[in-house]
Image (tube, helix red, strand yellow):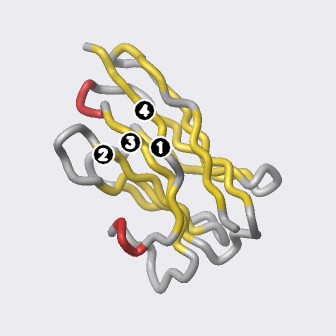
Amino acid sequence: QVQLAESGGGLVQAGGSLRLSCAASGRTFSGYVMGWFRQAPGKEREFVAALRWSGGNTYYADSVKGRFTISRDNVKNTVYLQINNLKPEDTAVYYCAADRNPLLTSRISYDYDYWGQGTQVTVSS
């Protein structure tokens, strides 16, 4: 059974950095697309970044390009989201997700089959 477990969230000041981790287990993930989404209070869940496990191609929302970096560690079966120059508007619960049968690299949450429990990121001004 596929399981995704996020960690690394916390309270940081604006301008700071965090690295979120998503430990994936239950199978091999070659062929999967791994994504990060976030959801702020009162808002819909939004796409942040995605990565094709095979090949490592990456994709980002325009709002985070240049500040967020998605990467993977094949040995640890872990996906990371490095967030730099954090802003108060980055405050949200961040979710890791996996798409097991991607025809393309989707930015739509309902295309993803598996989800983690989320990790809270709070940025103070």
Marks 1, 3: nearer the viewer: 1
Check disc 3 and report the residue beneath it.
Answer: 66
Name the residue that disc number 4 marks.
120
Nearer-the-camera pick, 70 or 2: 2
- Nearer the camera: disc 3 or disc 2: 2
Residue at image point 69% right, 69% down: 29
| Mark 3 Cα-neighbour bin, 10 Å: few <14, some 14–19, many ≥20 | few
* Residue ranking furthest to the right: 75
- In the drawing, does residue 116 fall left or right of residue 14? right
* 3 and 4 marks in contact (CB < 8 Å): no
Kind of element beneath mark 1: loop
Residues marked 2 and 1 touching at CB (< 8 Å):
yes
Q: From mark 4 to mark 2, how far is it between C-alphas?
A: 10 Å
Q: How crowded is mark 2: few (under 14 residues within 10 Å), some or many (20 or more)?
A: some
Q: Is residue 95 above or below residue 110?
A: above
Quadrant the N terminus occupies: bottom right
Residue 59: percent from left, percent from top: 43, 61
Q: Label 1 belongs to which residue?
A: 118
Disc 1 marks a residue whose amino acid type is Gly
Q: Which residue type does callout 4 highlight?
A: Gln
Type of residue at label 2? Gln
- Whether the residues at callouts 4 and 1 have beta carbons within 8 Å, the answer is yes
